Amino acid sequence: MISRSEPRSRRRVPLVLVPWIVYLGVTLVAPALNGAARSEAFAEHAIITLGISGAMTMLWLAAGRRPPRRRLDSTREVAPNGALGHRDTLAALNCSGDECSRDF
């Protein structure tokens, strides 16, 4: 059993490629094996399918490799009631019943 604290080995094939490969198999390979490859319309279908789905898959992979955005600590402030928040977005409210008031 592998512990969660142990680093995982890097996958050889990104997981997002599995459904894409299955999609290509269903939309291109299966019809080609059934004789559709003889038609000129199939070649057009194959080019469009590979181009659009390939581009979308590459964009998905590229988006997953971007580093996460970091928040700057300089934008954080402490409200008088001790709550942390972002400047201009934190409104510490005291609510009692149906009325609320700001604590600034």
Image: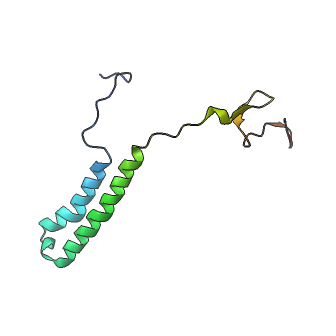
Query: How many callouts does the rendering have?
Result: 0
Q: Position of residue 17 (x, y in %)?
A: 29, 49
Q: Viewed as shown, does residue 4 lie left or right of 96?
A: left
Up the image or down, 79 lies above or below 39; here it is above
Judge by depth and name the residue closer to the eye, 82 or 67. Answer: 67
Q: Position of residue 90 (x, y in %)?
A: 74, 39
User: Residue extending furthest front?
Assistant: 74
Q: Position of residue 86 (x, y in %)?
A: 69, 38
- Residue shown at 18%/67% (left/top)? 31
Q: Quadrant of the N terminus?
A: top left
Q: How is the image coloured?
A: rainbow
Q: Viewed as shown, does residue 96 lie left or right of 69?
A: right
- Residue shown at 28%/30% (left/top)? 9
Find residue 15 and report its image quarter: top left
Q: Viewed as shown, does residue 96 lie left or right of 53?
A: right
Find residue 56 and report its image quarter: bottom left
- Residue shown at 58%/37% (left/top)? 71
Judge by depth and name the residue closer to the eye, 39 or 55. Answer: 55
- Residue shown at 25%/54% (left/top)? 21
Up the image or down, 62 lies above or below 26; here it is above
Q: Quadrant of the C terminus?
A: top right
Q: Position of residue 102 (x, y in %)?
A: 84, 39
Find residue 27 and report its image quarter: bottom left
